[in-house]
Amino acid sequence: MWTRATLFAAALAIAGAAAAAEPSQPDVTVAGEISGADHQTYREVPFDVPEGTERITVTLTYDKANRTVVDMGVWDPARFRGWSGGTRDRFTIAPSDATPGYLAGALPSGRWRVLLGVPNARKDSRAAYSVNVFFDRAGQSRASAAIADPPIKTEPGWYRGDLHMHDAHSDGSCQSRGGRKVPCPLFRTVLAAADAGLDFIAVTDHNTTAHFGGLRELQPYFDTMLLIPGIEVTTFGGHANIFGPARFVDFRVGTAGVPDVDALQRDAAASGAILSLNHPALPSGEQCMGCGWTWPDTDYDKVAAIEAINGTMTEGPFAGLGFWYARLNEGHRLTGIAASDNHDPDVAPGKSPPGPAPIGRPRTVVHARALSTPAILNGIRAGNVFIDVEGTRTRLLEVEAAADGRRAAMGEVLPGRRPTTIRAHIRDAAGSSAELILNGQPTGARHPVASDDARLTLVLKAEKACGWAAVNVRSSEGKLLLVGNPVYLSCDTVRPQ
């Protein structure tokens, strides 16, 4: 394919890989030895938790050569916080979530105790052990890194996902076994996404992290699909998804703690998340309270993406496509994404009313260095992304622009005001047509897509190569099938004489 790794993308990949690896220096290390005298006894390993800690991760290693067995649990200064016996070598606890078997909740400062149980230690044996403790605090994420799952896939490629859905932890519902409409268990939503053939999903319940623990529990079972924690931050002036937060983000814009939307944006970034505006062109007021994005002081430099298509709203006055294009024309660099906004995993294609859609329809297709949360979020930031409106498993839209010997993929920048060649690789869309979009408007006639593995070459004259250009694909009836992200054409560069 034509896309290539840039220095920027490489830097993101290195940063993401570092974040996913366990830090070499924990905040606390306690080493000791288990001997035969410890057989069928318990040992406490104390450690102190500082004020302001947002997550704790504990890892245990020990010598198993002589069939020594060590179980593990933990107490905070006042109460029991969990037990995993000998089934785990690490656990994490935060206000938002915890490893299964451990209790999420407040992290009081003071003396905590890891409890080591020794169900077996041979009479003359000796086994060294080490307990490492990692903290998340302001500006540090050692605990999150220490518990991070390895990538589901390590190779770069196109990964297909749905970035907006709900379950019982907010307003998702489905039919019970007896046929009643009930709050829908998280498992049902995740199972429907797996059945749809998705590579990743973000579960984005409204203003809560209650589903984070469930996602942590489900990820080992759904080991071919990445589960990204998300929150639909629902305010009086609009909804925004945040993807990958390590903690709760306060949604109460207009209060002392969150005086304006800029404070919300800063807190979302501090949580480790990226922010995307949801269904921004919907009306607000009594017709749809807080649905459209109306905050006048939005800093679009702190917005990573815009939901260009939400559910069945592909084009028209309530679709986000025009809102996104308008922000691009203002000079902002924002990735266009799409999502189902699903509230019922049982809804079938063609059966959903205007608005939310079946899981995976539409889907956002991200070129990422791996299938992991850091890689997918970095891929969205970088912008080499396209939207598959019908949620297929195979359609492809690769775009590369070239000018003066330089090349750029979607999301990247070329110097403008030069003759520019745009090449599009379109797969599994025979009989459709491609259109070149320049600064939000189609340029000239559509170009037939004659086969299921088509390559088209489109040309921009130098005087028109300014702003941004994208490629969209439409069916023979004119319906959008694929929506490409921009290649940016910088008008500030002066062509040498």
Image (cartoon, rainbow, N blue to C red):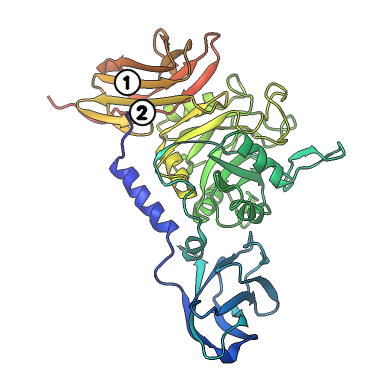
Three-letter residue code for mark 2: Val
User: Residue 357, located in which quarter of the rendered image?
Assistant: top right
Q: Secondary structure at mark 2?
A: strand
Residue placed under numbered mark 1 in the picture: 422
Can you give x and y, in whole percent of width and height, for residue 216 in the image?
A: 61, 55
Q: Is residue 289 left or right of residue 201?
A: right
Q: CA distance from mark 1 to mark 2?
A: 9 Å
Numbered badge on residue 141:
none
- Where 487 falls versus 72 (above or below)? above
| Secondary structure state at the residue bearing disc 1 | strand
Would residue 289 be found to the left or right of residue 15 on screen? right
> 412 and 30: which one is in front?
30
- The residue under the point 47% across, 50% down is 151
Classify 10 Å Cα crowding around label 2: few (below 14), some (14-19), many (20 and above). Answer: many
Identify the image quadrant of the N terminus.
top left
Viewport quadrant of the C terminus: top left
* Marks 1,2: beta carbons within 8 A: yes
Q: Position of residue 464 (x, y in %)?
A: 31, 17
Determine if residue 297 is in view: no
The one nearer the camera, 301 or 270, is 270
Which quadrant holds residue 224? Answer: top right
The three-letter code of the residue at mark 1 reads: Ile
Q: Residue at x 34, y 43 (%)?
A: 9
User: Which residue carries the number 2 mark?
Assistant: 487
Question: Up-down: is 326 above or below 14?
Answer: above
Instruction: Count residues near mark 1 (Cα–Cα under 10 Å), then give few for <14, some for 14-19, many for 20+.
Output: many
- Earlier in the chain: of badge 1 and badge 2, it is 1
Where 482 sits versus 303, above or below? above
Residue 318, image x and y in percent? 62, 24
